[in-house]
Amino acid sequence: MSKKIKYLITGGAGFIGSNFVHYLFRKHKNIHVCVLDKLGYSASLANLKPYQDCKDFEFIKGDICDDKVVAKAMAGRQVVINFAAEVAVDRSIDDPQSFLKTDIFGVYTLLEEARKQKNFKKFIQISTDEVYGQILKGSFKENSETLPRNPYAASKLGGERIAYSFFKTYNLPVVITRAANNYGPAAYPEKVIPLFITNLSDGLAVPVYGQGKQMRDWLYVEDHCTAIDLLIKKGQDGEVYNVGAGEECTNIELTRRILKLMGKDQSLINFVADRPGHDFRYSLDCSKLKKLGWKQKYNLTDGLKLTVDWYKNNEAWWRPLKKNLDQRFVSGFWGEKK
Ligand SMILES: NC(=O)c1ccc[n+]([C@@H]2O[C@H](COP(=O)([O-])OP(=O)(O)OC[C@H]3O[C@@H](n4cnc5c(N)ncnc54)[C@H](O)[C@@H]3O)[C@@H](O)[C@H]2O)c1
């Protein structure tokens, strides 16, 4: 029998990380998965409940900036996917320091331990399209200029460049992904789609920043997972890969689509003050990833329907998280429209 592949999934109690754990166990046999997560505000252990008695699963509570805990979690691992990060742009504008710590120093700590492992196969650094900054026309390619415009995006760029330097300097097999906005089951309800669904479930208005004219490309989380899985096998070391769905939509159009799916009318739209330096549009050219054989499965219509249904059927998951959510997210993080 072939030996088990040993994965380390950091941030695996969060949104994309936990979806990736589900994906791995659905798609692969002969694997062992260790999740390292500090269980921050956006994490939910309920996401990992299906594996609590699984002999091929281990959970370690800890911080990726802590070299001792990272050494323990990394021992004998062959594949690392680093999802752990401080993620919310609004929070990074409010308090940049924690972003610099986790999203740069934390990545460095993981890389240092990864390069001590024997038979190490792949380090996937999950980055974001926000590292490019905004683009008004056309789409970013992997070699486009990077001009991050908020502390979250700048920290993520720092983290991925440290990872690249470990490839160049120490030959560590690093692959970097830059993904578009993800949505789907188990996203923390401060993110726009689950925030709007859960607000509407409670009969509350939905806070739309500015005029809602910003454009985003929406990637269903399972499609992100299939891309990462493919890149573990086929991604070229030292390379960056864009991961987007090409499902562009303005925020106001997205809001109207959610209202319609929830059977609510437009009187529940509340235009609020815009985020400072709000990026207007992101768009990714994903031909490099597609050449490796990746194809997305979900368009925005199908993905949104699945997401709305998931939140309708999983109130017990989101209610405790929503209860503790900073109320600024619920009514508009930057306050009343000026
Ligand atoms: N959500 C998106 O739209 C999106 C898009 C592109 C890229 N990404 C990237 O994907 C990754 C996951 O994002 P997400 O949306 O699932 O976020 P999330 O907040 O749901 O999950 C992040 C997880 O990381 C954990 N974590 C945070 N700091 C940690 C630390 N110092 N040590 C250990 N664990 C820590 C949290 O507890 C949480 O469980 C991030 O790296 C993010 O930058 C997200």
Image: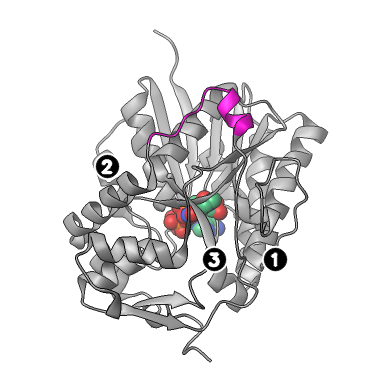
- Residue type at numbered disc 3: Gln
Percent coordinates x, y for residue 282 in the rendering: 60, 55
User: In the rendered image, which quarter contains the N terminus?
Assistant: top left
Residue 290 part of the magenta segment: yes
Percent coordinates x, y for residue 84 in the rendering: 52, 52
The dot on residue 52 is 2
* Tag 1 residue: 149
Which mark is first along the chain, 1 or 2?
A: 2
Q: CA distance from mark 2 to mark 1?
A: 40 Å
Total marks shown come to 3
* Tag 3 residue: 214
- Residue type at numbered disc 2: Gln
Q: CA distance from mark 2 to mark 3?
A: 41 Å
Above or below residue 302? Residue 254 is below
Residue 19 seen in this snapshot: yes
Residue 62 seen in this snapshot: no
Circle 2 residues within 10 Å: few <14, some 14–19, many ≥20? few
Q: Can you tell me whether the CB of the residue at mark 2 lies under 8 Å from the nearest atom of ligand 1?
A: no
Percent coordinates x, y for residue 189 in the rendering: 35, 65
Percent coordinates x, y for residue 141 in the rendering: 69, 41
Q: Residue at x 65, y 62 (%)?
A: 101
Q: CA distance from mark 3 to mark 1?
A: 15 Å
Quadrant assignment, res 292? top right
Above or below residue 95? Residue 306 is above
Between 35 and 255, the one lying in front of the other is 255
Compared across the picture, whether 52 is left or right of 94 comes to: left
Residue 185 part of the magenta segment: no
Residue stretch in magenta:
287-297
Above or below residue 46? Residue 97 is below
Q: Residue at x 40, y 68 (%)?
A: 190
- Residue type at numbered disc 1: Arg
